[in-house]
Image: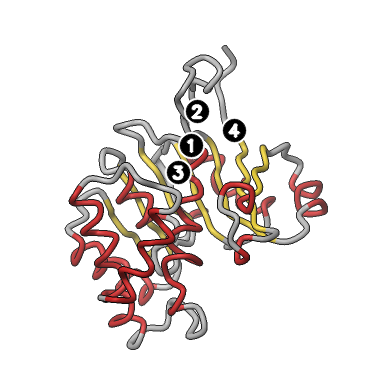
Amino acid sequence: MEEATRGMEVITRYFSDFTTEQIRQLKALEAVYHEWNAQINVISRKDIGSLYEKHVLHSLSIAAVYNFPPGSRVIDIGTGGGFPGIPLAIIFPESQFQLVDSIAKKLKVVDAVADALSLTNIYTEHIRAEEIKGRKFDIAISRAVAPLKALWAWSRPLLRPQNIHSANENPGTLPDASGLICLKGGDLAAEISESGTRPKVFDIYELFPEDSFREKYILQVPYQRNV
């Protein structure tokens, strides 16, 4: 419990508008992940003690830049232990999150976490993103899964074009999320060039000046209907 309290301090340093239920869910993450990570290693041993900063807050950096409108359908490609999908599902309870991974045992952990937190807006599927047919999503998210070129190739067929608002059109609000939004680190110049895309890039360290976020970035490749 003390570790969860300390972990929550780094979250509330940057986010404050939580409901009582969201606070309960965020605090519950620590015990559930520690229990399941001892059985199925989805978080490295050296990082499990920094769960809230390196995994939860890292995932929530997307929520510091973008809003997920109610009713949005979101696919988390290669979710692993549930990041960034689970923290974002807590923050955006009116959006629906499909968390997919090619490794079934990882989804066992995701299902256990979602059940423990009473998250009813998460669904899991043991499948590769490129094998999904006949379904469309508003937003694709991913965290350190594959090069941008591959992520865009997998996600684009799954996305429906969006008419989205920008913060310029709605002062005081975050722009609506759309297209592919992924979390990446390091020197991305070559990867971006090879992808053939022109993503928007946000420096997470500028949002959350914690040492673990140096050279960590949010990339968004919009998929937007011409208006």
Quickly name the residue at label 3.
63
Quickly name the residue at label 4.
222
Q: Alpha carbon of mark 2 to alpha carbon of mark 3: how far? A: 10 Å
Q: Alpha carbon of mark 1 to alpha carbon of mark 3: how far? A: 5 Å
Quickly name the residue at label 2.
175
Quickly name the residue at label 1.
66
Q: Residue flagged by tag 1: what amino acid is it?
A: Tyr
Binning the other alpha carbons within 10 Å of mark 3 as few (below 14), some (14 to 19) or many (20 upward) gives some
Q: Alpha carbon of mark 2 to alpha carbon of mark 1: how far? A: 5 Å
Q: Alpha carbon of mark 4 to alpha carbon of mark 2: how far? A: 12 Å
Q: Position of residue 78 (x, y in %)?
A: 48, 61
Binning the other alpha carbons within 10 Å of mark 1 as few (below 14), some (14 to 19) or many (20 upward) gives some
Q: Residue flagged by tag 4: what amino acid is it?
A: Pro
Q: Residue at x 37, y 55 (%)?
A: 87
Sequence order check, earlier mark of 1 and 4: 1
Q: Residue flagged by tag 3: what amino acid is it?
A: Ala
> Of 12 and 38, which appears nearest the observer?
12
Sequence order check, earlier mark of 4 and 2: 2
- Asked whether the beta carbons under mark 1 and mark 4 sit within 8 Å of each other, the answer is no
Kindly give the residue lying farthest to the top in the view shown.
Answer: 227
Q: Secondary structure at mark 1?
A: loop
Q: Alpha carbon of mark 1 to alpha carbon of mark 4: how far? A: 12 Å
Specify the quadrant of the image occupied by residue 27.
bottom left
Sequence order check, earlier mark of 3 and 4: 3
Q: Position of residue 59 (x, y in %)?
A: 47, 55
Q: Residue flagged by tag 2: what amino acid is it?
A: Pro
Q: Position of residue 127 (x, y in %)?
A: 41, 61
The quadrant the C terminus occupies is: top right
